[in-house]
Amino acid sequence: MYKVCSTNGCQMSDIAAGLDAAIADGVDILSISLGGRSKEYPRDPMVTAAFAATQRGILVSCSAGNDGPLESSVTNEAPWILTVGASTMDRSIRSTVRLGDGTEINGETLFQYKDFKPDQLPLVVPSSSDDPYCFGSLDATDAKGKVVLCMLGDGTNAEKGRIVKEAGGAGMILMNDEVEAYIIPDEAHVLPASHVSYADGLKIKSYIKSTSNATAAIVFKGTLIGNSNRAPTVAAFSSRGPSRQSNDILKPDIIGPGVNVLAAWPSKLDVNYTSEGPNFNIISGTSMSAPHLSGVAALLKSVHPDWSAAMIKSAILTTADPVDNQGKPIVDEKHERANLFATGAGHVNPSKAIEPGLVYDIGPENYISYLCAHNYTEEDIKVITQNTIRCADYQKNGGTDLNFPSFTGYLKTSGSFIQMYNRTVTNVGGANSIYKLEVTEPSGVSVVVEPQRLQFSRVNEKASYFVTLSIKDKTKGSYAEGELRWVSDEHVVRSPISVFMTT
């Protein structure tokens, strides 16, 4: 562990020094829960340090950023970085709101009151002259002995609870805003509370308006795992693609647990954020999800010590799950189907990643070729690679020929336009194995693959295939998704396909 930040923030010079020290120490995996805005690669020290690590066989796992759901907000997006988005888990720390009409709405809170009686109490919203976000004061609201419904926004959630408590409130219901939707953080509120989704908050508001005697009880049910929680779901804050710097590469690469993650904390915390509690905390962010993927990468490195960083990354991506625990496509914070620029390849599945069957390897020289093809100057590439480079010495391959385990295409609807890809896979499964092609075509797009069968007689044998994308129906919209699968008796090797169609 390398300390690169202080109370004054994180300086890029300190981050670079920490990364240099880690590389010199011979680490196998670098886990970096840091990020900022998207920058051109020569002006992003994280990109330069990650390339130096990759050259030495070190896999670099980075947070994708917390600026979602804004499009193209992803950071740490260089092809040689494992860029990790955040998703929910099937665990909830449940506090149920029981309305006076019998309706039950499930919410969450980290602080579970053992002695709080689930009695029906008057339920109110802040007075029209008070802040609906319960920030500042509730001087005009008769909150004494009541449950107060507050909206997300304007100040911290803990501060809202303190204000309700100081006004004499017996409890608080905190409703999400429309952006956060169904993603609920577990927090240590200072009074009995339940944090509910935006949709459920609207139901509670409607109930309050429907009666002159609205009441509610808060019932604490502790930690529940599994039950009916749909997971994983992409977190609202998880930064989205397409990448601003490499829009022909799918970013983020993958999602992993990053919402309500319980972990050690450097200082003691209790419900009042004093120094009396345990050295643990629950927080959310892609800074939580990246370490999960770093751990999976370390597991793979221990089992396959001879694998390159790209091979480990490939194993993780091609075995990721595109569906949730209900067998349905992964959804986003609004419970709408998440696209590939939210999920990447899908949700990490460590058990499958250990034995992926086939992997896509990429060497440092391939990344240099990619940079040359994207018209970075030789001086820019020298900054990134810390080496003098002549692009004339490298085959100019763009994203279509970078041996990446996914396909991102841009097709023109005017005229005849195709996009071709060349991929090479390495057999890390059985010595004698046969893989057959399966394709789910993006709507309106033709996917032609040659050959349609890959046969291997030994471990580490390589085989190449070619993919051609073209438009077959110009009326199907501007964006579509599909996937390519190589299937054997023991393995399914998935590669997502994302296609933009422009005039």
Image (cartoon, grey):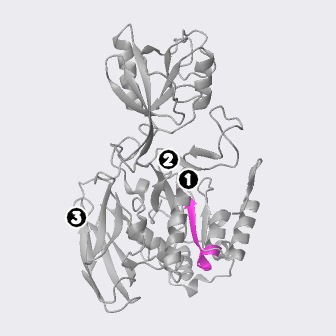
Please tell me in which quadrant of the rendered image residue 290 appears.
Answer: bottom right
First of labels 2, 3 by sequence position: 2
CB atoms of marks 1 and 3 within 8 Å:
no
Q: Secondary structure at mark 2?
A: loop
Q: Which residue is mark 3?
A: 472
Whichever of labels 1 and 3 marks the residue nearer the N terminus, that label is 1
* Residue picked out by circle 2: 259
Residue 165 in the image: state x and y as whole percent.
60, 19
Looking at the rendered structure, the secondary structure element under dot 1 is helix
Farthest front residue?
115
Earlier sequence position, callout 2 versus callout 1: 2
Specify whether residue 376 is in view.
yes
Three-letter code for the amino acid on which mark 1 is drawn: Met
Q: Position of residue 208 (x, y in %)?
A: 39, 15
Q: Residue at x 34, y 65 (%)?
A: 497
Give the CA distance from mark 2 to mark 3. 40 Å
Residue at numbered disc 1? 288
Viewer-side residue, 398 vs 228: 228
Which residue is at a point 35% across and 17% down the rendered structure image? 207
